[in-house]
Amino acid sequence: MPIDAAKAVAAEPRTGEISWTPKDVQLYHLGIGAGARPDIAGPATDPDELRYTLESRLHVLPSFATVAGAGSPGVISSLSMPGVEVDLAHVLHGGQSLTVHRPVPVGGTATATGRIAAVYDKGKAAVLVMRTEVADADGPLWTNDAQIFVRGEGGWGGDRGPSARLEPPAGDPDKVVERPVREDQALLYRLSGDLNPLHADPEFAKIAGFDRPILHGLCTYGITLKAVVDTLLGGDVTRVRSYVTRFAGVVFPGETLRIRMWRQEGRVRVEVGAVERDDAPVLADTIVEHT
C-alpha cells in the first residue's frame, strides 16, 4: 500500500525557514482578484482595493498564510514524506482550516514546521491531514491544516476520522455577493507557489478526470475570505481569527462565484456555488470566526 498511516504520522516533522515580502503579498492579492470591484464597477484605484495592492497602504488577508514562503513545506512536498507515495493525478484538496494567532505581517521571516497530523481511511480514498505551524521571533503566527484526498488509497480498515459536515444555515443569507473568476485566474494564482499542473495543463487535467484545468481550491478560499472581510467585517483583516472550509466541488476559470453569508455570534457561515452551473456547490461547511 503506497500509504503507511502509522509511518506517516510518526515521521519527523520537516522544519524550514520561510520568508515573504510585500510584493509576495500583493501578488497573492492580485491572484485572488484584488483590484477589481465587480459589485460597484469601481476602478482598480478604489481606496478599499488599494489596501490589498498598494505597498504604502498594504494589509494582509489572513489566507495569504496558505502560500507564504511559497506554501513551504507545501502540500506537494509533503506527499513525499515517509509513509506516503502517491500519484499526483489522484490527489484532491478536500478541505482547509487556518487559525491566525496574530495579524500576518506584510513581510517577514519565520520558521515553518510541517507534519502529517493524521491519516484517515474513507474507504475509496485516504485523507491526509497536513499541518503546518509557523512562528517568528515574536511567537506563533498561524497554523494551517490541509485535508488531502488521495483517491484509490483507502480501504485498509483504518480510522474514518471526524465528519466535517454541518447542519445547513437557517433562513435567508444576510449578504449575497458574486465574484467573477478571470479566465487567466489560475495562471496568475499559481505564481504564488502552487505549481500543480492540474491548474494549467489541459492534458494533465484530462488525466486527472477533468475536461480542462480547474481553479485552485485555495484561490476560491482566498476570494471567499476577501468577500467576507470586505462586506461583513468592515474591511478589517485583523478581525479574522480562524477560517475553515470543505471543498465541495471544482471551479473552472471564467465562472462566477455566488457567495452567501449568514451572520452568527462571533462568526460568519458561508456557502459558495458556481453561478453558471445552477449554484453547484464549491465551498461548504465554511466558517469565518472573528472578533
Image: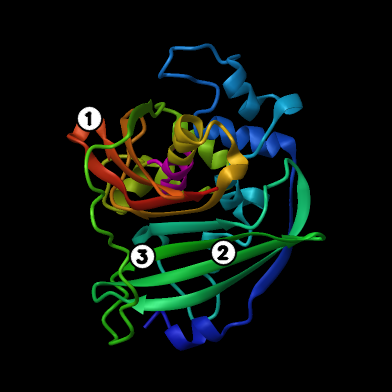
Residue 56 part of the magenta segment: no
The magenta segment is 215-223
Judging by the rendered image, the residue that carries numbered circle 3 is: 149
Residue 217 part of the magenta segment: yes
Crowd band around label 3 with a 10 angstrom C-alpha radius: few (<14), some (14–19), many (20+): many
Judging by the rendered image, the residue that carries numbered circle 1 is: 276
- Residue type beneath disc 3: Phe
- 245 or 109, which lies in front? 245
Q: CA distance from mark 2 to mark 1?
A: 34 Å
Q: Residue at x 37, y 48 (%)?
A: 204
Q: Secondary structure at mark 2?
A: helix
Q: CA distance from mark 2 to mark 3?
A: 15 Å
Q: Secondary structure at mark 1?
A: helix
The residue most toward the left is: 278
Q: Secondary structure at mark 3?
A: strand
Judging by the rendered image, the residue that carries numbered circle 2 is: 77
Q: Is residue 53 left or right of residue 260?
A: right
